[in-house]
Amino acid sequence: MTDLISFIHWNVSPEIFNLGPLSIRWYGLLFATGFLIGYYIGEKMFLSEKVNQKWIDSLFLYIIIATIVGARLGHVFFYGWDYYSQNPGEIIKVWHGGLASHGGALGIIIAMLLYSKLVSKRNVLWTIDRIVVPTALVGAFIRMGNLMNSEIYGIQTSLPWGFIFERNGETVAKHPTQIYESLAYLFSFAVLMFLYWRTRSKNREGLLTGVFFVFIFLARFLIEFIKEDQEAFEADMALNMGQWLSVPFIMTGLFLILRALKLPEKIYRNK
């Protein structure tokens, strides 16, 4: 797979194995693994704060549904509306591919608003501050799934770690931007874990959420400069769709960080 002289020749099958019509794919396995590990981390965080176990179980369900629905609708509206508006039946066919991380983020925020109102009865930022920690790790797993699918990679490069995505018919090396993003998300996860467990950041509502937004979406914004456009219409844009969608998250993150540092700590007492 690896050319020791120059580049990395990537021709990995996205399927691990199949049983008749049932196909087990790397993307799905990594997606599920990320969520399971994320659930374990989130459970440890919630239990350390002695919250109701029922909160944890219902939170996992909220996040799973919100991520899939939000990411799918994000792809439909942000990247493929011309196609899906003419083929609405394709919207529900998630197995055909097409998920947008910005849509997933919006879906989770909406779900957390509902969760905070119906379940925890706490400020929505209390909930989001905690779920962003494992979410950063889940994002890293998902990007490795994109690598296994040979998708959303970068422009041509002469760097020795460039990937030739042979499955897509590529003959020149491209930036493995999936790996760049995965590493950025892992770094963000490490920072958030440190802030949560080793500092009092969790008592400043919105601080962890703000750090997550700035770290994750600033990395996404910068990496997009060396990523190939996902849709043809992006060729005429000063910034591509991923960058435009990242800007509001970055600005919101900065606002939340400044706000959190000015406000006093808030500690909830469990009933």
Image (cartoon, grey):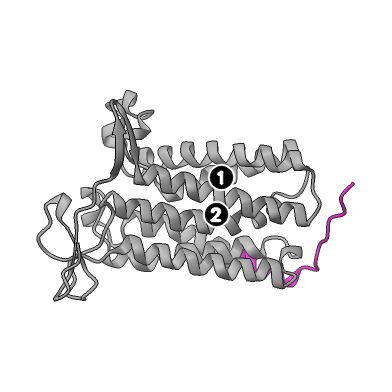
Specify whether residue 170 is painted magenta: no
> Which corner quadrant of the image does residue 130 belong to?
bottom right
> Which corner quadrant of the image does residue 111 belong to?
top right
User: Between disc 2 and disc 1, whose residue precedes?
Assistant: 1
- Badge 1 crowding class, 10 Å Cα cut-off, few under 14, some 14 to 19, many 20 or more, is many
Q: Are discs 2 and 1 less than 8 Å apart at CB?
A: yes
Front residue of this view, candidates 118 and 131: 131
Which mark is drawn over residue 108? 1
Spot occupied by residue 139 in the image (x, y as percentages of width and height): 46, 55
The magenta stretch is 255-271
Q: Which residue is mark 2?
A: 135
The reply, left or right, for residue 153 in relation to residue 158 is right
Figure check: 114 above or below 43: above
Spot occupied by residue 174 in the image (x, y as percentages of width and height): 20, 65
Figure check: 78 above or below 152: above
Front residue of this view, candidates 77 and 100: 100
Look at label 1 and name its amino acid. Answer: Ile
The reply, left or right, for residue 262 in relation to residue 136 is right
Residue 220 in sight here: no
- Residue at position x 37%, y 60% from top? 243
